[in-house]
Image (spheres, rainbow, N blue to C red):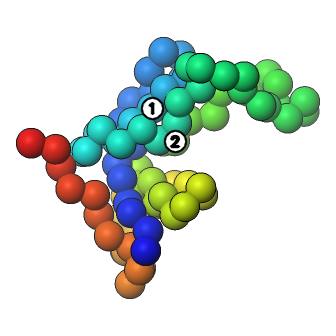
Amino acid sequence: MTTVHVAGPPQMGGLYQECARCSYVLQDYTGGAIMIPEDQADTGIPTFPEGWRIVISGNAAWAKAEDAELCEHETECRPTS
């Protein structure tokens, strides 16, 4: 089972990003070293596109376009109240 979140705006220069709907932490580089391949050193910290749905499955995460349909094994996160 995978959960689909909505990427919020990158914070702290891209070091931190969470779900705009449920506040799930999508990435947090605030407490450790950032590993960026040498040939990509000038591109900055990679972030998920704001507003895109982000699929989380175990330790894997990837962006899914906002208009893309959910697969049968994907569920949307629930908003926090």
* Place of residue 5 in the rendered image (x, y in percent of width and height, measured from the top left): 36, 53
* Cα–Cα gap, marks 1 and 2: 8 Å
Ranked by sequence position, the earlier of labels 1 and 2 is 1
Residue 79 point in image, percent of width and height: 18, 49
Residue underneath mark 1: 17
Quick one: SS at disc 2?
loop
**Is residue 28 placed above or below 69 in the rendered structure?**
above
Kind of residue at badge 1: Gln
Q: Is residue 23 left or right of residue 65?
A: left
Q: Is residue 62 visible?
A: no
Quarter holding the N terminus is bottom left
Q: Looking at this view, name the residue that lies furthest to the top.
A: 12
Which quadrant of the view contains residue 37?
top right
- Compared to residue 4, the image places residue 26 above or below, namely above
Q: Residue at left 39%, top 30%?
A: 9
Where does residue 75 sit, x and y in percent of width and height?
A: 32, 70
Taking the image as drawn, is residue 27 in sight? yes
> Residue at horizontal 16%, vertical 44%?
80
In the displayed structure, does residue 69 sit left or right of residue 60? left
Q: Which mark is residue 29?
A: none
Q: Amino acid at mark 2?
A: Phe
Question: How many other residues sit within 10 Å of disc 1, few (<14), some (14-19) or many (≥20)?
Answer: many
Instruction: Provide the residue designation for mark 2.
Output: 48
| Relative to 26, residue 15 above or below | above
Query: Cβ–Cβ below 8 Å for labels 1 and 2?
Result: yes
